[in-house]
Structures are given as C-alpha cells and as structure tokens.
Image (cartoon, rainbow, N blue to C red):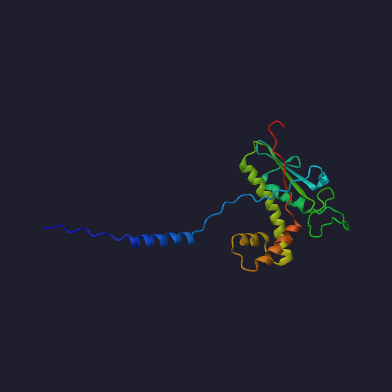
Amino acid sequence: MARRATPEVNAGSMADIAFLLLIFFLVTTTIEKDKGIARQLPPKQDENVPPPPLKQKNIFIVSVNQNDQLLVEEELMELKDLKKAAIEFLDNGGAPSGSAEYCNHCKGKRDPSSSDNPDKAVISVQNDRLTSYRMYIAVQNELVGAYNELRNRESVRLFGPNFVYTDVKNSINEGKYQGNIETAQDKLEQVQNLFPLKLSEAEPKKRGE
C-alpha cells in the first residue's frame, strides 16, 4: 500500500502574522526612559573675570562626611530635617523692607542674618569621596524637594489649586497634560523664577583634607 505524502505547511501566512504581531508590539509597548538627576551645568567662566561677590549669609552649606553624617552650617543634622532647614533658608527673605532685594512672596522669619531673597540664596553641597551614593542621592532629593515644595506653594497662590507645580510639570513630561502646554510652561517658568534652583556642588574632599 502506497504511503501518503506528508502535506507541506504553508509558512507564508505564519510569517505575515508574526510580522504583524511584531509591529503591534512595537507600536503599543511603552519604552521606559532612563531617569537621573536633572542638572544644568553653568557655562564656563572667563578666568580673567572675577566671580560676583556673595554674602556669606546667602550661602547654605551642606556637607556629608565619609561616614554619611550630614553637617548643615557645620552642625550635625538628621536627613529628615534637611528639607525643612533648606526651606527656612530659601524662604527667609531677610532683605530690609523697601530695598531692591526685598522679597514680597517670602513667608519666612525675615532673619537679617540669613538669606536676603531666593534669587541670592545658594545651597552649596560638598561630599567626601567616600560618601555613599545612596546618601548622595538622598541629600539631593531632600534639597530638590525643598525647592519643589516652595514652588508648589507659589503656583497655587498665583494660578489656583488646580495648578500644582510638580503635578503639572510631571504631566507635561509624561505627555499626559490636558490643556495648553505652551501656556502651562510659561506659568511654570514664572514660578521657577520666584525660587530659582541654585545648587552648587563643590569638588569632593579627599579623606584627611
């Protein structure tokens, strides 16, 4: 009895289906973006031009030693207290009333021995070379959190409770903002100008320095 020939499978349609599935997954899959610490480096300064003078009271010094201990203004501080201390410094508004540097939107203690206004206030961060990366990130998060909290306050004051700085900014970055993006970005810029991010990172210290 003659054996039947094994029928061949037409793989052409399967290839088409596989190709369509590949296109479908490429179109619908969300690719995660790498996230890091957003920092814009200042432009290179001309060595022949001296840097502008800074009042010591307008500098908030944050140091982390090799044991991950936090020193703020040369005093030991717990990490959980850093954001509050930074807010008090940035929002102080110590310039005298009627002066060009007076801060109308500041709600701090207006201590004349602390920062004059947010535009003059600089937070200087210095780490030891043996500082852990975990502690470095934690300190950065607390300091940026201080700026964001103040910006949230001002955005609500200026534009109402539905315009929270961090929420709007995140929505725009994620492509989820429902509204006029150009107008929203103009408002974000206004808020940023009230509390400009001025984080200065000094060169890490070597052990024993």
Q: Position of residue 162 (x, y in %)?
A: 66, 66
Q: Residue at (71%, 54%) from the top-left corner?
A: 147
**95 relative to 69 in the view: left or right:** right
Residue 130 to residue 57: above or below: above
The residue most toward the left is: 1
Residue 17 to residue 112: above or below: below
The residue most toward the top is: 208
The residue most toward the right is: 98
Q: Residue at (71%, 62%) from the top-left corner?
A: 155
The foreground one among 37 and 142 is 37
**Image label count:** 0
Q: Residue at (65%, 51%) from the top-left corner?
A: 38
Q: Position of residue 45 (x, y in %)?
A: 77, 45
The foreground one among 56 and 76 is 56
The foreground one among 9 and 204 is 9
Quadrant for the N terminus in the image: bottom left
**16 relative to 188 in the view: left or right:** left
Q: Residue at (69%, 56%) from the top-left corner?
A: 149
Quadrant for the C terminus in the image: top right
The foreground one among 16 and 66 is 16
The image quadrant of residue 47 is: top right
Q: Position of residue 13 (x, y in %)?
A: 34, 63
The image quadrant of residue 150 is: bottom right
The residue most toward the bottom is: 179
**84 relative to 171 in the view: left or right:** right
The image quadrant of residue 194 is: bottom right
